[in-house]
Image (cartoon, rainbow, N blue to C red):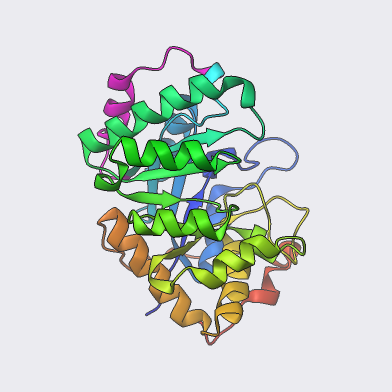
Amino acid sequence: MSYLVDSHCHLASLSLEGKAANNIDEIIERARRCGVSHFLSIACTSKEFENNLKIAKNYDNIYLGCGIHPLNLEDEPDWTDDRLKNNLLSSDKVIAVGETGLDYHYAPETKDLQIASFVRHIGIALDVKKPLVIHAREAKNDTLSILKSENARDAGGVIHCFTDSVDMARVCLDMGFYISFTGIATFKPSDNVREVVKYVPLDRMMVETDCPYLAPVPVRGIENEPAFVRYTLKYIADFKGVTENELAKITSENFENLYRVRLSDSEIKSKGCEISTYRIEKIIDKSFEV
């Protein structure tokens, strides 16, 4: 049995209300039909964590991460270490600290605030003994410096949605971190990301959607969802010269090793949902074990 994990998604941020609403059962079912068996749903705010908990309580195969995203710090100026620790220890489903990190692309003006928060998150990860989910955009030097100075290696973690250089990937790998790729790897202008895909060994790699953002080719432009990680898997598998099953197996084992969990076959009963609307039928391959 080959499992495929969407190792970073934001289930609580999907369109679950209003005219464009999706039923979470249908979203999970579409993913299951594409071979996606497990999910790590990340919270970037305290409210999002509460919403993720409500979603995850009905599913054995949804894990959770909890942190304050560097772009959400001004929304939660009063967050405390104790509250975050309590959230991280509130359920066995919570296996990761973050999303945390630095983003100088969208918010260079909050640099000092981001650095202080990142340092605090690393300290919390070391205290609760859970790995870090790290966001790093146009902040290579500070990210690497903080990871080293705060002994983040001892917590472990993943640089998610990696878009930086081979140089940065090399240092992160040397510190024991995993590298995770999104649908950006499929975008035509993303030669730099493909260089990193080429460089990173399979046993240090993960795949993710980061949904509802960054839908991969050929569904770019619509709301991303966990089923679409199959497109990214196929693209990277072809690029690395391995089968989809091989890459699914390896990346799932990497997920198990980082987060110290054992994935099981959590069969989800079909809800009879219509999948052709999202053209997912194009990526359903009966040779892929589900």
The image shows residue 36 at horizontal and vertical percentages of: 49, 66
Who's the residue at 55% across and 63% down the image? 31
> Does residue 189 lie above or below 202 as drawn?
above
> Does residue 182 lie above or below 145 as drawn?
below
The image shows residue 26 at horizontal and vertical percentages of: 58, 56
In the rendered image, the residue lying farthest to the bottom is: 287
Is 92 on the left-hand or right-hand side of 220?
A: left
Q: Quadrant of residue 39?
A: bottom left
Quadrant position of the C terminus in the picture: bottom left
> Does residue 269 lie above or below 19 as drawn?
below
Q: In this rendering, does residue 255 appear at all?
A: yes
Who's the residue at 71% across and 35% down the image? 18
Quadrant position of the N terminus in the picture: bottom left
Relative depth, front residue between 151 and 179: 151
Residue 81 within the segment the image draws in magenta: yes
Relative depth, front residue between 121 and 213: 121
The range drawn in magenta is 75-94
Relative depth, front residue between 139 and 121: 139
Is 224 on the left-hand or right-hand side of 250?
A: right
Is 79 on the left-hand or right-hand side of 75?
A: left
The image shows residue 193 at horizontal and vertical percentages of: 62, 61
Q: In this rendering, does residue 273 appear at all?
A: no
Is 130 on the left-hand or right-hand side of 67?
A: left
> Does residue 283 lie above or below 258 as drawn?
below
Residue 267 within the segment the image draws in magenta: no
The image shows residue 14 at horizontal and vertical percentages of: 61, 43
Relative depth, front residue between 156 and 207: 156
Total number of numbered discs in the rendering:
0
In the rendered image, the residue lying farthest to the top is: 78
